[in-house]
Image: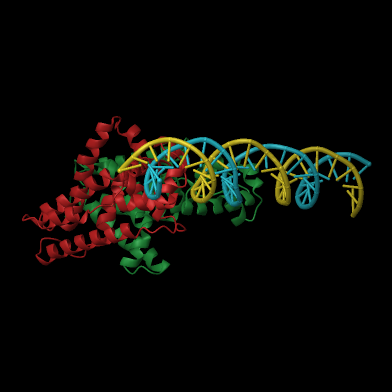
Chain colours: A red, B green, C cyan, D yellow
Amino acid sequence: MELNEKQLQIVQVAEKLFAEHGFAGTSVRQIAKEANINIAMISYYFGSKEKLLEHMVVYRMSDFKGELDTIINQDSSFKSRFNQIIELFVQRIHKNNRIYKIVHTELSNSTRCLTFEHYLVQKKNNYDALTEFISKGQEQHEFKKNIEIPLIIPTILGTYFDFHHNQVFFKSTYNLDTPEAIEHYINHSIVKHLQTMLCALVCLEA
Amino acid sequence: MELNEKQLQIVQVAEKLFAEHGFAGTSVRQIAKEANINIAMISYYFGSKEKLLEHMVVYRMSDFKGELDTIINQDSSFKSRFNQIIELFVQRIHKNNRIYKIVHTELSNSTRCLTFEHYLVQKKNNYDALTEFISKGQEQHEFKKNIEIPLIIPTILGTYFDFHHNQVFFKSTYNLDTPEAIEHYINHSIVKHLQTMLCALVCLEA
DNA sequence: CAAAATTAAACAATCGTTTAATTTTAAAGC
DNA sequence: GCTTTAAAATTAAACGATTGTTTAATTTTG
């Protein structure tokens, strides 16, 4: 997926607007205005508004699998690697939270017939990699059995996104007034919360 | 919040459509058509499309606080009550998942200036009630200290909604083909997953 | 000088809302 | 019990504004 400078400019602006106002809530005129380009350029470069979104998804969903494998293949304990995986997921989702929010919202709209195949394939890869890792840990009696493995990733992503979606609430209730405070809360409190909770779920040792 | 038969009919149809296609993605003509009423009736009864959403939120967000207090004031162990609270949250969100999805989506759209005060006030009440319950458990040495209490509810709601939003993925990957299978997975596997994980996080006893 | 990029303008379709006319409802008057 | 009557409910049609996309002309590029 190669984009020239102008295309990248459009994608970046559109990503921000789609994440903030939704796909249907954003007009091509808003995108054109904010990206300082003519309205016709969107059709010219991408074909349509829908295809712009598809290009965006493919462009943004770069290989997460590689980073995941690097950790899994490390020579450290299962618990240590599991903790690193959790931290990687949070950082990854946080860094790309706009495109993930867009995909989540549009994916759950039953009538949208956009092809999110690229997203779904990558998701499947992540689930398979994690399942294999946990299974190995179980075989070597490092991880508990009878765990609902498919729900580990939803817990990580869900906890992050529920916080993210309700920032208005958390800001006012828990004194997270500055962007730095929020950044710190995500990278420390949320990561630690998930690590503590999920390790307690899967790790055998006390 | 009292609604006559016709108003209720409009609200129910609109709730379904807003949840499926988003607020911006749903037109008043779609609502009118599916509810078998004239387009003008929406303005006539609610004033506008935006006010229809506000009426919907107030109508649907009935008192959750009462059910929560009933469990908290029970004469059983902290752990038992905590497990019941988790189950209640999941059932409650699942039962009303449409309106929660709508509110979550619209709330995170930074420009929308709708008043979700009714939702935010209720959310605050739930957080306060849970915080008080956990604190008491900590005082009586039944619950661990140094827990990030504000993240317990996001973990419950987030895990549920990530699963819910990605049903397309889970259906194909984990053989959840029938509505009954999904219902069972939510009421048993998800509830159990959250109970195991969160109890491991907060409960002291093994 | 041909290809690519950019533009303003126009396209038909749809958006949310309002209007003005008509029908239905239900209580009051006799 | 029937008519009267004003309010409430419902309708089709029109409103101007905005939607995504296309066109045809112009400018820029290499």
Q: Quadrant of the N terminus of chain B?
A: top right
Q: Residue at x 63, y 43 (%)?
A: B45
- Tell whether B170 sits left or right of A44: left
Residue B169 position by quadrant = bottom left
Relative image position of residue B111 (x, y in whole percent) = 44, 36
Residue B135 position by quadrant = top left
The residue closer to the viewer here, B201 or A65, is A65
Q: Residue at x 47, y 47 (%)?
A: A24
Q: Residue at x 44, y 45 (%)?
A: B103
Relative image position of residue D27 (x, y in whole percent) = 43, 35
Q: Is residue B162 above or below residue C7?
A: below
Residue A105 appears in the rendering: no
Q: Is residue A146 above or below residue B117?
A: below
- Tell whether B13 sits left or right of A145: right
Residue B167 appears in the rendering: yes
Q: Residue furthest left?
A: A75
Q: Residue at x 8, y 55 (%)?
A: A74
Q: Quadrant of the C terminus of chain B?
A: bottom left
- What count of labels does the image hold? 0
The residue closer to the viewer here, C20 or D24, is D24
Relative image position of residue D14 (x, y in whole percent) = 71, 42
Relative image position of residue A104 (x, y in whole percent) = 36, 52
Q: Is residue B173 above or below residue D4?
A: below
- Tell whether B1 sits left or right of B107: right
The residue closer to the viewer here, D19 or A160, is D19
